[in-house]
Each structure stands twice: as C-alpha cells, then as structure tokens.
Image (cartoon, coloured by chain):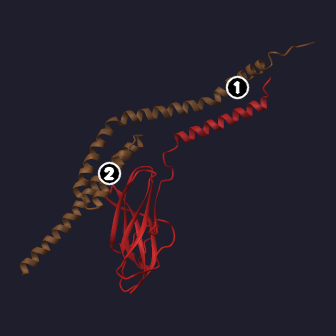
Chain colours: A brown, B red
Amino acid sequence: MKLQLALALVLCAFLYVFGFVYAENFDLELASLVDRVSKLYSMGVNTTSVVEKLSSAVKAYDSGDFEKAWSLLSEARNMVAELEKGASETYFWLLLSKACIVALLASIPIAVYLLLPRIYLYLWFRAKRKWVVRR
Amino acid sequence: MLLDEEVFAVILALSIIASALGIALTLKPGNPEPFTAIGLLNEECKIGRYPAAVVNGSSVRLCISVANYLGHPAYFKVVYKLTTNETLPNSTAPSPEQAVMEWRVLLNNGEEIVFPITIPVHTLRGEFHIALVFELWIYNTSASGWSYTGRWNHLYINIVV
C-alpha cells in the first residue's frame, strides 16, 4: 500500500514537473518566434498572418490541445523563415520610399520659391491677355 | 513686382512649416509612447454593473480586455489572484498571493482583445471582503521569462456564506 502511494506520488510529481517544463518550452519557443516577428515588423514586413497563426497556437495551448498548438507553432516557424528571406528587400524599399517622401517634402519650399512667382505671372498675364492698353 | 513681397514671404513660410512638419511625421519613430493596458469588464463585456457579493465557492463571469501599443507584437498573460487589502499589487511589484488562473494572449501592435472568463471565488484566510486581482505580465525574451508590466485591475467583492 505504501509502495503504491509512493509510486502515485512520484508519478504526480513527474507529471507536474513535466507539465511545467512543457509550458516553459512552449513559452520559450513562442517568445523566440514573437521576437523574430517583432524584428520583421520593425522592418516593415506585414506580419499579420504569422501573428494570427501564433495566436491560434496560444489558444490551442490554453484549451489543452498541445499537439495542435505545437503543429501551429511549427507552421508559424516556417512562415517566419519564409518572411525573413524577403525582409531585407522589403526594408530596402521601405527606406527608399521614406527617402523619396522626405526629398519630395523638402523640395516643396524650393519649388514654391522658384515656381510661385513664375506661375503667378503666367496666370496673371493669361487672365488679362484680352485687356487693351490705352494711352 | 506683381506678387506682393509680403504675401509671397507668408506663402513661403507656410510651405516651409508644412514641409518640416511632413518630414518630422515621416521620420518619427513608429511608437513614441509605447504602453500596454488591461481592463476589467462585467459579464456582458461592458463597464459597470460588477458583482458586489458572491456565494463562497461559486464562480463569477467577467470579461478581460488587453491592449498592446508597444510598437511590436507581444506575448502576454493575465494572472488571476485572490488578495486582501494588504496583498494588493502595485505598479512595480505583483501581488505575493498565489495565481489561481491565467490566460495567455498574443497581440499585434495596436491590437486589443476582449475575452470572457469564469473564475472561482472563495474566502481567503478567513477574510470575507477580498479583491479579485488581474495582473498583466509580458514574456521577456532577453530574460527568458515572464515580467510583470505594472498594470493590474482589481474588483472588491464580499463573500457570502
């Protein structure tokens, strides 16, 4: 009887520790993916689909469906790897588009300074071209 | 000059201001003031009409809302604890009481989630006036563990035997 009780206690302890380690591993794995997704996000990559996938993994884990949770996590890992391949290019285009916008905005005062008097004169003469000058 | 010089100067000044503002908005960091938020709602997921008294050992239905405005996706957990007035959390330390339940959520930047919960409520060390505390924790990858965000909500409740 004592032996059975001891065995049951050992089994309970094992399951408790195993469950704890399992949860730790899941958190660690998920967090490392979130970290990678954050980096992709800061590079301008659209990460909505990966975040949704990871979110589904968390929901599956919380509902006790560990197999589905790990499977979704694996899918998300593949998606992240795929996104990482094109991240540099996306980042380059993001920087380029920002540089173009800044250059365009910076050129507005110069354009106003150079073109406004000319455009104003052109429009003024155009508006008054039918006028007749009399002495 | 046909175009009045003063008018021209004003237009030029306005264009410089508009240009500087546009450049500042384009180059500003993604999220200058990052923050997270946790909210406690009633069972209809609305503010107000919270339960004031509950039978000892019964369950209470509420809703929790979590928002992420950190500027990047983040992994959160909401930890439910039963506390007394002396063991409430503060903005730097969580409550020393044991966690009763927890829920994990992963949120994209700017995302907010509201989810219903059913929690057990019972007396705590003979206290009948207790607080239901919900702490928001975030997974810190550099420390490989959960960190308390300093955000929490609590609801005082009377336990009826």
Can the viewer see residue B93 in this picture? no
Which quarter of the rendering shows the C terminus of chain A?
top right
How many numbered marks, from 0 up?
Answer: 2
Can the viewer see residue A21 in this picture? yes
Residue of label 1: A116
Relative to B71, say whether A19 is above or below.
below
The image's mark for residue B37 is none
Give the SS element for disc 1: helix
Give the SS element for disc 2: helix
Q: Nearer the viewer, mark 2 or mark 1?
A: 2
Residue depicted at 34% across the width and 80% down the height: B57
Residue of label 2: A54
Chain under disc 1: A
Q: Give residue B21's position: percent from left, percent from top.
A: 61, 40
Q: Is residue A74 or residue A25 the one in the foreground? A: A74
Q: Give residue B50's position: percent from left, percent from top.
A: 48, 73
Chain under disc 2: A
How packed mark 2 is, by other alpha carbons closer than 10 Å (few <14, some 14-19, many 20 or more), is: many
Q: Residue B93: name its quadrant.
A: bottom left
Q: Residue B141: name its quadrant.
A: bottom left
Q: Is residue B17 or residue B126 the one in the foreground? A: B126
How packed mark 1 is, by other alpha carbons closer than 10 Å (few <14, some 14-19, many 20 or more), is: some
Residue depicted at 9% across the width and 74% down the height: A7
Q: Amino acid at mark 2?
A: Leu
How far separated are the C-alphas under marks 2 and 1?
A: 54 Å
Q: Give residue B151's position: percent from left, percent from top.
A: 45, 65
Q: Give residue B105's position: percent from left, percent from top.
A: 36, 58
Nearer-N-terminus badge (2/1): 2
Check the image and name the residue furthest to the right.
Answer: A135
